[in-house]
Amino acid sequence: MTAGSATSGSRRRELDVADLVERARDGQARAVAKLISLVEDASPQLREVASALAPHVGRAQVIGLTGSPGVGKSTSTAALVSAFRASGQRVGVLAIDPSSPFSGGALLGDRIRMQVHATDPEVFIRSMATRGHLGGLSWAAPQALRVLDAAGFDVVLIETVGVGQSEIDVVSLADTTLVLVAPGMGDGIQAAKAGILEIADVFVVNKADRDGAERTTRELKHMMSLGRKELTGPSWRPSVVQTVADKGQGIAEVIEAIGAHREWMIAHGELDRRRAHRARTEVEAIALQSLRERLDDLRGSVALGTLAQRVMAGELDPYAAADELVAGLGASQ
Ligand SMILES: Nc1nc2c(ncn2[C@@H]2O[C@H](COP(=O)(O)OP(=O)(O)OP(=O)(O)O)[C@@H](O)[C@H]2O)c(=O)[nH]1
Ligand SMILES: [Mg+2]
């Protein structure tokens, strides 16, 4: 590999990636953390990491949790971790906060909720604040997921606030997506507006200890029955489960619903379809990123300058100029 020579003399010491992956697979949390940091920092060793992980991925069951701020995602995540641990599974958690300028506070809150798991070596928890990353979450989260998958976690939970496209991107990483709503905030309707109804495999009406839980549950079930009429072929009807996450109530039912969804997916070839879609999205995101970088390199280049001159002089139209530029990109590597 040329990675070593390309980065020799850089400020950072080269890490032995193969050794890190071995240690991560041995269950060493520090190695897992280091690999995720390499991913997050877009280390020059990123490609090496990706290639070392590749033979070991594809085993983990990936569960996404999304929903409005404060609906109880972290509390539910912590409760689910306990439940999966009780059945002997190793659990990884990625808490992703893509947009909030106040992520520090939110992540601090998560840390407190997760404290009960902090000393369990079979649980690995990582918060990722990905604001400011070029291309946002589209590449960092899937690579972090690959690290946890390769490290042998049976279940990976991905928590993200459901407010926009980047959350939907993250959730599309999951085999099963839980959409959390709480009663009394018109949350069901908000969910419909935000387009997260379509991504739910299981609805969790959390804070069922509050007034209105029955009504929210009914509304959601009604919406599900409306939506289904337009679908053709076999389709999964999202289940609706009530929980009181901070008391652990209803968590067993959530696990059951996740299991039922998984069985349905396997029976209908949907799990493979989702994973193929995930891989395609990942490749696409990396390719786009690399094209974007190469385009950035062109800014101010002689080639672009010359083309611009010709467009200005009326010798070339801007479409033809762009074609030439893009053709040049392909040739440059
Ligand atoms: N009454 C009640 N409160 C709950 C329940 N679940 C969580 N909470 C409380 O709701 C608040 C928010 O919970 P979190 O788990 O931090 O919510 P979140 O969705 O992760 O919040 P963000 O990550 O900030 O979007 C906390 O004070 C929890 O203790 C529940 O079932 N009932
Ligand atoms: Mg949270």
Image (spheres, rainbow, N blue to C red):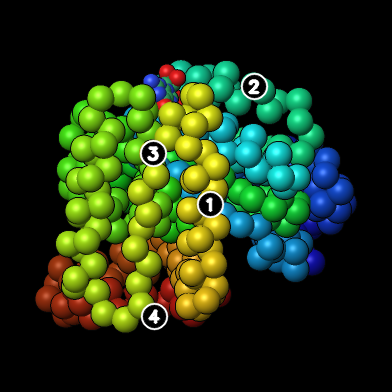
**Mark 4 belongs to which amino acid?**
Ala
Residue 21: % across, % down: 80, 53
The disc, 2 or 4, on the residue closer to the chain's N-terminal end is 2
| Closer-to-camera residue (113/236) | 236
Proximity of marks 2 and 4: CB atoms separated by less than 8 Å: no
Report the amino acid beneath label 1. Glu
* Residue position for label 3: 242
Return the residue at label 4: 327
How far apart are the alpha carbons under marks 1 and 2?
Answer: 25 Å
Of marks 3 and 2, which one's residue comes earlier in the chain? 2
Depth check, mark 1 against mark 4: the one in front is 1
Which residue is tagged 1?
Answer: 256
Q: How many marks?
A: 4
Answer whether residue 326 is visible to the viewer in this image. yes
Label 3 crowd bin: few (<14), some (14–19), many (20+), radius 10 Å = many
Q: Residues within 10 Å of mark 2 (few under 14, many from 20)?
A: few
Q: Is residue 96 visible?
A: no
Residues 326 and 157: in front is 157
**Disc 1 versus disc 3: distance between alpha carbons?**
12 Å
Position of residue 290 in the picture relative to residue 232 (left or right) = right
Q: Report the front residue among 37 and 308.
A: 37
Q: Which mark is residue 115?
A: 2
Q: CA distance from mark 3 to mark 4?
A: 55 Å
Task: Check contact, mark 1 vs mark 3: CB within 8 A.
Answer: no
- Percent across and percent down for residue 329 are 44, 73
- Marked residue nearer the N-terminal end (1 or 3): 3
Q: Residues within 10 Å of mark 1 (few under 14, many from 20)?
A: few
